[in-house]
Image (cartoon, rainbow, N blue to C red):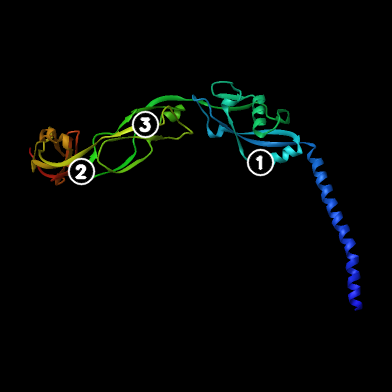
Amino acid sequence: MQKQTETDSNQKADKPRKRRLYAFTFFLIISSVLWLFVKLADTYSVVLPLKIQLTDPQPEYWISEQQAGQLVNATVSSKGFKLLTFYASGFNNQHINVPLGQVTLRKQNHNTFYITSLSLKSYLASVLGLDEDEIMLADGDLYFNMETLTEKKVPVVVNHSIQFIEQFGLYGRIRTNPDSVLVLAPSPVLDTIRFVATESYSATGISSTFTKTIPLTYDQTLLHLKQTTVDATFEVERFTESVASIKINKPGSLRMRLFPSETKITFSVAMKDFHSISPEQFYLEPDTTGLSTRIKFLGIKIIQKPEKVSITRIEPDQLEYILVK
């Protein structure tokens, strides 16, 4: 009974101490918050290395990745609240895109340009949500190099993977509109460009002529194209297979006998061209490569054939021969 009375007395004595502790903690938090607000209301100056990415040069110029990436040292003087918001946004760890059409750009010489410090300062302040008098650039005007683009027309090559219905196939070359495009690039790069290819186009079950708009594929960091798509026309026809016996002609500089003296050629041709193909349109000769080594058999060379046919097989495809003195 006495122990119970002592416990109740101790609990009653602890209550005032806990209330005082709670009150102390509450006022400590309040005073800390007030102190923080007072400090954040003060003006501070910080030096920030800002990562600049120059973008959207004029169409007649090209800027390399190395020249486009710049580092600008800026001193920002502002209230603590604004600086806290600025750091929370993560701007100090990101690239800031600077479109060259939105700043004052001046030319120093043929390839050297610069953005005036005042123009860059104004643009960065607007992007960062600062007043212009809150930011100063330590490095002054921003200098960089751009190259003048040269231009030339190059042909278009269509990349495709088309599966036709049996007996159907592509008739002739794929036609594109336009058949060539104007390419702008730095002179050393342009010298290496021979053509511009399309994105790969795939289709299955094809049996008729069709036209498809296909985008061009190119390195956009190096090339500028006046047109980025072409209309490609795939002409499709039904094909048949035919066989013709063709005479093998002797090379004019050699006297020889050939065995056999003719061969059979199997070729594929569009149905609409079938009746226009004749054996006289083919011209074959023995392949005399290696003749000096006295090889036993000679291959057959196709010197001439109708443009509209595709040869699939030659039987026989080797010849025996006798050189005549």
Q: What secondary structure is found at the residue carrying circle 1?
A: helix
Q: In this view, does 242 lie to the left or right of 199?
A: left
Residue wearing tag 3: 230
Q: Which image quadrant is residue 229 in?
A: top left
**Residue 317 in view, yes or no:** no
Query: Which residue, as the protein is rendered here, is positioned at the far bottom?
Result: 1
Q: Which of 106 and 321 is in front in this view?
A: 106
Q: Disc 2 residue type? A: Gln
Residue 89's label in the rendered image is 1
Q: What secondary structure is found at the residue carrying circle 2?
A: loop
Q: Disc 3 residue type? A: Val
Q: What secondary structure is found at the residue carrying circle 3?
A: strand
Residue wearing tag 2: 167
Q: In this view, does 247 lie to the left or right of 220?
A: left
Query: Where does residue 296 sit, x and y in percent of width and height?
Result: 14, 47
Residue at (67% x, 31% y) in the render: 125
**Residue 312 in view, yes or no:** yes
Query: Up-down: is 138 above or below 296?
Result: above
Query: Up-down: is 71 above or below 102?
Result: below
Q: Nearer the viewer, residue 257 or 87?
A: 87
Lower position in the chain sequence, tag 2 or tag 1: 1
Lower position in the chain sequence, tag 2 or tag 3: 2
Lower position in the chain sequence, tag 3 or tag 1: 1
Q: Which image quadrant is residue 230 in?
A: top left
Query: Where does residue 219 sit, x and y in percent of width and height?
Result: 45, 35
Q: Quadrant of the C terminus?
A: top left
Query: Where does residue 276 sit, x and y in percent of width and height?
Result: 13, 32
Q: Quadrant of the N terminus?
A: bottom right
Q: Is residue 114 left or right of residue 198?
A: right
Q: What is the C-alpha distance between the residues marked 2 and 3?
A: 28 Å
